[in-house]
Amino acid sequence: MSCSCQNETPTIRTVTIPYSHLKDRSVDLSAKIEEGFGPNGLGILSISDVPGYSSLRQNLLRLSPRLASLPEDVKKELEDPNSRYNFGWSHGKEKLESGKPDILKGSFYANPILDRPTTDEALVQRYASYCGSNIWPDRALPELEVAFKALGKLILDVGLMVAYHCDQYVSRGMNMHENEGLEQILQRSRCHKGRLLYYFPSLQSNCTEDGGSMSSWCGWHTDHGSLTGLTCGMFMKDAVEIPCPDSAAGLYIRTRTDQIVKVVFGEDELAYQIGETTEILSRGHLCATPHCVRAPKGKDAFGVERSTFALFMQPDWDEKLNFPDVVHIHQELISAHGSLTFGEYTEMLLDKYYHLKTKAPVV
Ligand SMILES: O=C(O)CCC(=O)C(=O)O
Ligand SMILES: [Fe+2]
């Protein structure tokens, strides 16, 4: 890990694993997994030299401003209130830390592997945010489906390799039942979710000030699922890709010791973060990652937009989660219900946080 310090907030480079090591199941990557995801790690690591990745990233991220600038009535047709906007276009539906609607970014959600994970209508109603169907802009932006699925599949394939090495690391510290490792859970899931994010350009009135807030573009949170694949954000101005105009802008992480650090990884690297579900199931051997995104500031930030893509890899709605006896996240929910499926667990969380289905998702 290298660290350069500016404004007292250190900038830390992620632990990086070359793809050639990752794909080799006989290489022992425990030390790297521990350094990135273990109790003293940042909860993020990146994979370098993934074949084909750079162009798939560029193809998809370049479509993000085009999607966001489609006419309002076209975007409205891509909305899915029934899934609480967890499929298709979502803008201004989620709430910020302040409770105000989040109008700073637009998201497009889809399952990159299965267009329709089940035909069972009862399941679609019960777990609408997982079991729903994809909504593609077939006429307005037909390239989106191809580019989204191609990048999403690649991030899943590489993510399964990361998961294999996570299991190797965790099984050194605890007994793992057969079939209950992260790799197998993710392999058999039908509900992975991709999110193409578009951060609208800063407006003149607010791009000089962010009130010192780290989370000016995306609030502090931990991802809910198992493992999140994340691309390096692409900054653009007037449809042209530019370097980020403010070195303080980008992804921030809160460390185990409550320090806030800015995290960087190469444009051609694919980053992975741990979600809450993995932290619970691994009994804390792998730790979830609190993170947020800071918008650029200063006069050069005017008109600058950011695009990125996240793949939330999560257990199937039917997956029985073998929760440990002692957990420190969502303890009251889990201990009251010995064995829960991931679908049931998620519905309970949504109810806890979002007051009986009136608000936003927890991906
Ligand atoms: O924009 C980013 O880099 C991170 C987005 C994120 O954390 C999320 O979608 O959960
Ligand atoms: Fe996140």
Image (cartoon, rainbow, N blue to C red):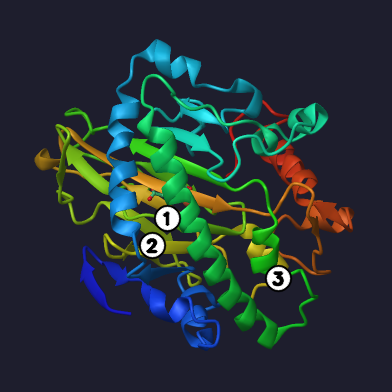
Pick whichever of labels 2 and 1 is earlier in the sequence: 1
Q: In the rendered structure, which amino acid carries the disc numbered 1?
A: Leu
Where 336 falls versus 351 (above or below)? below
SS at mark 1 in the image: strand
Find out whether the residues at labels 2 and 1 contact each other: C-beta distance under 8 Å. yes
- Residue 82 at x, y percent in the picture: 65, 23
Point 26% across, 59% down: residue: 267
From the viewer's perspective, tell me whether residue 73 is left or right of residue 183. Answer: left
Point 55% across, 82% down: residue: 25
Q: Is the residue indicated by label 1 positioned so its CB lies within 8 Å of ligand 1?
A: yes
Pick whichever of labels 2 and 3 is earlier in the sequence: 3
- The residue labelled by disc 1 is 230
- Residue 111 at x, y percent in the picture: 56, 41
SS at mark 3 in the image: loop
Residue most extreme to the left: 299
Q: In the rendered structure, which amino acid carries the disc numbered 2?
A: Leu
Q: Can residue 269 be seen by looking at this rendering?
A: yes
The quadrant of the picture occupied by the C terminus is: top right
In the rendered image, which quarter is residue 172 located in? Answer: bottom right
- The residue labelled by disc 2 is 270
How many C-alpha atoms fall within 10 Å of the one at disc 2: few (<14), some, or many (≥20)?
many
The quadrant of the picture occupied by the N terminus is: bottom left
- The residue labelled by disc 3 is 181
Pick whichever of labels 3 and 1 is earlier in the sequence: 3
In the rendered image, which quarter is residue 216 located in? Answer: top left
Where 260 falls versus 17 (above or below)? above
